[in-house]
Amino acid sequence: MAETSKTATLSIDGKDFELPMHSPTAGPDVIDIRKLYGQAGVFTYDPGFTSTASCDSTITFIDGDKGELLHRGYPIDQLAEKSHYLEVCFLLLYGYLPKAAELEKFENTITRHTMIHEQMYNFFRGFRRDAHPMAIMVGVVGAMAAFYHDSTDINDPRQREIASHRLIAKMPTIAAMAYKYSVGQPFVYPRNDLDYAANFLHMCFSVPAEEYVVDPILSRAMDRIFTLHADHEQNASTSTVRLASSSGANPFACIAAGIACLWGPAHGGANQACLEMLKEIGDPENIPEYIARAKDKNDSFRLMGFGHRVYKNFDPRAKVMKQSADEVLDLLGVENNPILATAKELEKQAVADPYFAEKKLFPNVDFYSGIILEAMGFPTSMFTPIFALSRTVGWISQWKEMLNDPQNKIGRPRQLYLGETERDYVDIENR
């Protein structure tokens, strides 16, 4: 906990209450209200917890006004440009950039634990053939607790580390199997000679009938998608993981809870919503009409993939993602894909429009990631599972941090009750 350097005074009915304030290393000061109810008999009211710090953390920091995202102090654009996903995983998990030998050992551990228990294949066959991949992932990840009993004791640091490595290693396999099952193709086992991103693409797009070689440009783009989505502070799914963890739940149940939360269209489905918008626009010729609608206050239409709830300036991840999108589209082309052609033209026209510049509605990471995944051949139903795969390390890092926090206690939000007060039960014949 940060040091208390000053206090805030709250006046209620003529009585003053002194509340300690904590100063972080970055971001606004925080008023500590933990003893407020005991001292003053009142709760605070903050739907969505948008003005409430639920924990202290050393992992990720966001400054929405500056357009800044730091992992352990390192800017996301530097990590995406100079690093790769598994190194970022190490950074998030352990708090520092690894030396060469440490990184090699970590990569070797993850690479050699990508297979899942053979009996887990039966879980997939229990789902309907048209089951959404996210529904499959929620079920299968939660079921891991039934197979890996040696890593469910949250009080054992070694078991926590084993569970962390297993989830990072096996999540691409589970996501790829969910995809293969949804399209009726045979499962593809992971390969230890491929890197993390290339292995995922190989499991998704190779078939037993022919050789499949992963293009390095696509592998690099996939790795950047993983990196740029690795963690994002105390968002809805991360808070869900922390809340589930506060009860003492096993790590697989906690991560399954995070996946379930991410499934919501307001959280993990933004890039899917963007692609659906592009399909609605249909043709580049229709873009001026939709831009006009987006600027019309009386029209409910909004441009998906532009602007961000947290970033009030620009999304620092978007610049790197745009570079990858340009590389992928140059490789694969857009001539025969009207969605991608529409996306490129929409980006061009929106960026040039003064209205969007004034409102700071710049293309965000979801706009470009959707374009990349569409170009690679992923259906929109796989966008959120890929997001879940990427975010797993962030969830685990936050989970581990919470378990090591001496101030950790079970989450128990309060409420503003507006229902009936006490009344007597009425027998059914007298109602």
Image: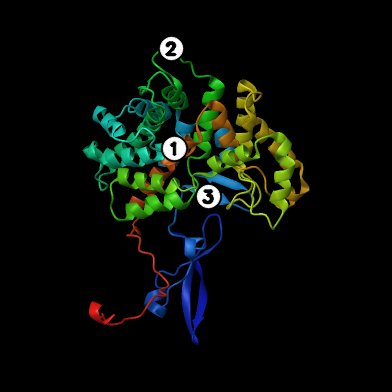
Q: Name the residue located 63 percent from the left edge and 34 percent from the top edge.
A: 322
Mark 1 surroundings: few (<14), some (14-19) or many (≥20) residues within 10 A:
many
Looking at the rendered image, the quarter that the N terminus falls into is bottom left
Q: Earlier in the sequence, mark 3 or mark 1?
A: 3
- Image x and y of residue 203, in percent: 41, 24
Q: From the viewer's perspective, is 118 left or right of 339? A: left
Mark 3 neighbour density, 10 Å: few (under 14) some (14–19) many (20 or more) = many
| Image side of residue 45 versus residue 159, left or right | right
**Label 2 crowd (10 A; few <14 / some 14-19 / many >=20):** few
Q: Going from the N terminus, do you reach mark 2 or mark 1 first?
A: 2
Q: Which residue is mark 1?
A: 385
Q: Quadrant of residue 125?
A: top left
Q: Are marks 3 and 1 in contact (CB under 8 Å)?
A: no
Left or right position of 27 against 416? right
Query: Is residue 104 at all visible to an observer of this figure?
Result: yes
Q: Tag 2: residue type?
A: Glu
Could you say whether the residue bearing mark 1 is in a helix, strand or loop?
helix
Residue 61: mark? 3
Q: Nearer the viewer, mark 3 or mark 1?
A: 1
Closer-to-camera residue (92/228): 228
Q: Amino acid at mark 1?
A: Pro
The C terminus lies in quadrant: bottom left
Query: Which residue is pictured at 43% across the width and 25% down the height?
Result: 204
- Mark 2 or 3: the one toward you: 2
What residue is shown with label 2?
210
The three-letter code of the residue at mark 3 reads Phe
Instruction: State the image coordinates of residue 9 (x, y, percent, origin top left).
Output: 51, 77
The residue at 46%/25% (across/down) is 201
